[in-house]
Image (cartoon, grey):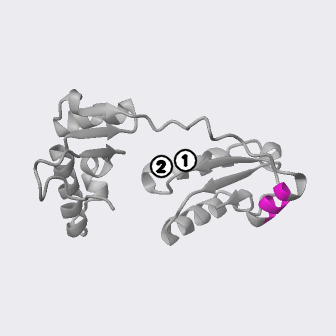
Amino acid sequence: DATISVDALDLRLPTAVTVYDLIPLLNQDAYLGVDTTWVRRWDMDKIASLRRSHLMLAISDYTRQEAMDALGVEGERIVNMSSAISDIFRPCQLDDGETQGLYARYSIRHPYLMYSGAIESRKNLERLLEAFALLPPELRARHQLVIAGKASESDGLRLLHLSQKLGIGEHLVL
């Protein structure tokens, strides 16, 4: 179970929270528009909970500094715990059949460039598609652009439409 309202019931219970980013707070126009009143209220409640926590665990030094600046919290209450990958993770070894099966599952037919992450406007994937389209035709013909991440239907359609418009639709794997 997770506590989502820090110190709402018992002010004596020490709490530590993980801070991934403060994007909704710092980009309110994009993330907390007028048509999302309940989202604004929910996010502002979470920000208030962050401020009441006894300790914040930031995923990077940048996030730590951002929390200090944006929330006005002293540095002693925010620790950079890092979100770097653990040594237990390593490339897995696939045999040729497993590799071909994986490629077939995702329609990968050529060497590829891959983006893995959030598929949303702030990631500027339109520029990635435009840059791929600018590659010399002979290089582009031998490669695919793989975009891996959860996309809303509208975001997926937007990227597919742009790839067609740029003439790289057959190279895009979404």
| Residue sitting nearer the eye, 117 or 144 | 117
Numbered label tally: 2
Residue type at tag 1: Arg
Which residue is denoted by mark 2 in the rendering? 123
- Provide the residue span drawn in magenta: 98-104
| Whole-percent x, y for residue 154 in the image | 49, 70
Quarter of the image where one finds residue 60: top left
Q: Are marks 1 and 2 in contact (CB under 8 Å)?
A: no
Residue located 17% across and 49% down the image:
13
| Residue sitting nearer the eye, 143 or 38 | 38
Q: CA distance from mark 1 to mark 2?
A: 9 Å
Left or right: 92 in relation to 83: right
Q: Main secondary structure of the magenta part?
A: helix
Residue located 44% across and 55% down the image:
121
Mark 2, other Cα within 10 Å: few <14 / some 14–19 / many ≥20: few
| Whole-percent x, y for residue 114 in the image | 66, 48
Q: Is residue 72 above or below residue 118?
A: above
Which secondary structure lies at badge 2?
Answer: helix
Q: Which mark is residue 93?
A: none
Q: Residue furthest top?
A: 76
Mark 1, other Cα within 10 Å: few <14 / some 14–19 / many ≥20: few
Q: Is residue 7 magenta?
A: no
| Whole-percent x, y for residue 132 in the image | 67, 46
| Whole-percent x, y for residue 99 in the image | 82, 55
Which residue is denoted by mark 1 in the rendering? 127
Which secondary structure lies at badge 1?
Answer: helix
